[in-house]
Image (cartoon, rainbow, N blue to C red):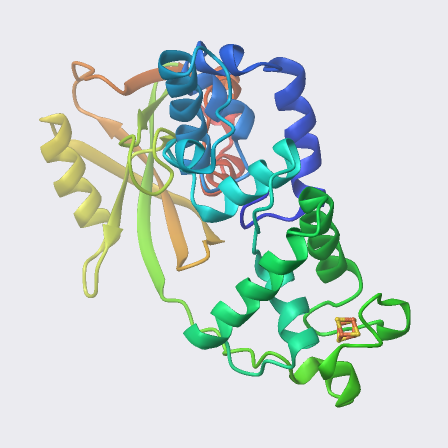
Amino acid sequence: MLQQTQVETVIPYYERWLNKYPTVNSVASEKIDKLLKIWEGLGYYSRCRNFHEATKEIIKSHNGVIPNQFGVFKSLKGVGNYIAGAVMSIAFNQPYVAIDGNQQRVIARVLGIKNLTQRNRKRLSLYLSQLVNYGNSGDINQALMDLGSSICKPRKVDCTHCPFRLTCKAHKFNDPLGYPIIIAKQKIPTKRFAAMLIRHKDNIFINKRAESGLLGGLWELPNVEIHNGSKSKTLLKEKLGCRFGCEVKVGPKLGAISHAFTHFKMNIDLFDGQLKINPKLKTGEKWVAFSDIDQYAFSKANHKLFELVDVSNG
Ligand code: SF4
């Protein structure tokens, strides 16, 4: 949960999760739809799917016991060096590093590293390996992460309260914020989509996204990506008509929303719509009452679309 996500955001999700799923077995035996519902809003949904797969693997191949060998643990779905290092050091007190962005920044400043070249990353990792070899590796890893999030922040430092103040090179050079050099983020592209609210009696049509890829396994209103020069209504009519095998009547625009992911921003126009006939539902397609949508996991962007809808005007 903590990958790419701040602690304050994670805490309520973590507590809800542990209340409902306190054991490996309770996660492994749950349906992915239910897990995604608890994860709803936290983003990066592949973490949830991978965690589910990893728990199933622990039950199947490790008798339900979390492996305490770095290599074996790392072979679980979704686990890389960072997670394996964090679990081995924090849960099993083994001398492994868990280098996150905070640790990297703190140690770069301590060692006076300006450029995070491959060679300098190795220096950094070696320094951390020596630190965790002193013992209490879990405490050291967590302390460095906390130091980076509270005292040695990207744009603000409090060197007088830092345990590294006597040896830190960036502090000695009186230029803590100059280390390491931050590469400016590239501007992210914006993609356009058109979505349709298809109503039938008191129900609306939703479909499930493919399990892999962005927002995999979540539910959504049917939508199409609009490329340069295409008209939203025409594309919705063509593509959804083709998909449902019947004529699609695209009604008035109900509104528009914007949502930003890490690597792109999306603008979505929402249209009212109707199908000429009631199509035969395929797997992953449903008619649901508006009052029941909270039983399904949707992305934040889809929840923003729901806010545009006047349900009483069915
Ligand atoms: S002394 Fe200052 S710059 Fe150095 S690690 Fe501590 S807070 Fe960061």
Does 112 sit above or below residue 141? Answer: below
Towards the viewer: 299 or 213: 213
Towards the viewer: 172 or 240: 172
Residue 148, by quadrant, is: bottom right
In percent of width and height, residue 112 lies at 65, 81
Q: In what quadrant of the picture does the N terminus appear?
A: top right
Q: Is 211 left, or right, of 176 in this rendering?
A: left
Does 208 sit above or below residue 20? Answer: below
Q: Is 152 left, or right, of 241 in this rendering?
A: right
At x 49%, y 34%, the residue is 306
Number of on-image labels:
0
Residue 196, by quadrant, is: top left
Q: Is 214 left, or right, of 302 in this rendering?
A: left
Q: Residue furthest bottom?
A: 173
In percent of width and height, residue 165 lies at 83, 74
At x 64%, y 51%, the residue is 133
Residue 103, by quadrant, is: bottom right
Q: Quadrant of ligand 1?
A: bottom right
Q: Residue furthest right?
A: 160
Q: Residue furthest front?
A: 134
In percent of width and height, residue 62 lies at 41, 16
Is residue 186 visible to us here? no
At x 70%, y 52%, the residue is 134
Is residue 301 visible to us here? yes
Q: Is 211 left, or right, of 25 in this rendering?
A: left
Q: In what quadrant of the picture does the C terminus appear?
A: top left
In percent of width and height, residue 234 lies at 17, 49
